Each structure stands twice: as structure tokens, then as C-alpha cells.
Amino acid sequence: MKAALIDRYGSNDAVSVADIDIPTLGATDLLVRVHAASVNPVDIKTRDGKLKTLLKYRFPLVLGNDLSGVVSDVGSRVTEPNWNVRGICASPRRRRRPQTHQRDV
């Protein structure tokens, strides 16, 4: 899977595209085959490190919150997924990035 990620805070030179493993699903997670993703101001502020006092992330960090795609797999406790996904994906309770700037190749 390809992903746009950062391994440090910085400007555009901090962003790279790399091959990563398909994420392991937790019991309540969805895996979405992304058809389209966008960059929004939160992604820019995250990349720049302007949110690091509020949001604690570990590197490497896959950027992205906005996506459109189709659910390709579900966790064991997901009972009725909406197979078409559009909008902002986030998991604020776990403070885990949704990793939307990635795609299968």
C-alpha cells in the first residue's frame, strides 16, 4: 500500500510517498479502499507541527482525514457497515490517525 507520510515535522520536504503494510484492524475498525483523498488545513498544520501540543502522534505519520472510498474489510465487532464511505474519518477517542492518504497498488 502506498501512503503519503511524514517522519518529522516540517514543510513539504518532510512529506514522502512510501510503501507501508496494510493496517491491522481492531475490533471496531473499518478498512477503506480509498478512491479519492484531499489535503485540508489540518493536514498542513499537522505536517508543520503546529498541533503537536494538542495532538500527540508517533512517526512515521500517515497524513489525511478526508476521503471517499469503499469498505474492504471490517473488525470483528462491526455489524452493519455502510460500504460506501464519504467525508471525514477520525477516531478521536483513541487519538489515532485515520491514515487516508494511502491506497492499494
Image: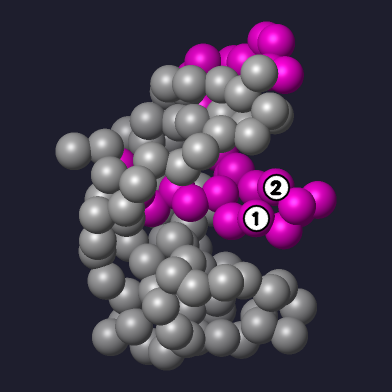
Residue drawn at 47 percent across, 78 percent down: 47
**Foreground residue, 44 or 25?**
25
Q: Overall secondary structure of the magenta stretch?
A: loop
Instruction: Please give the range of residues in magenta.
Output: 77-103
Q: Quadrant of the N terminus?
A: top left
User: The residue under label 1 is which amino acid type?
Assistant: Arg
Q: Residue at image x 65%, y 48%? A: 90
In reply to whether residue 33 is colored magenta, the answer given is no
Query: Percent position (x, y) of residue 66?
Result: 50, 48
| Percent x, y of residue 44 | 48, 75
Please indicate whether residue 64 sits to the left or right of residue 93 in the image.
Answer: left
Q: Residues within 10 Å of mark 2 (few under 14, many from 20)?
A: few
Position of residue 79 relative to residue 36, above or below, is above
Q: Residue at horizontal 34%, vertical 83%?
A: 14
Q: Quadrant of the C terminus?
A: top left
Residue that appears at 28% across and 86% down = 13
Q: Are marks 2 and 1 in contact (CB under 8 Å)?
A: yes
Q: Which residue is mark 1?
A: 96
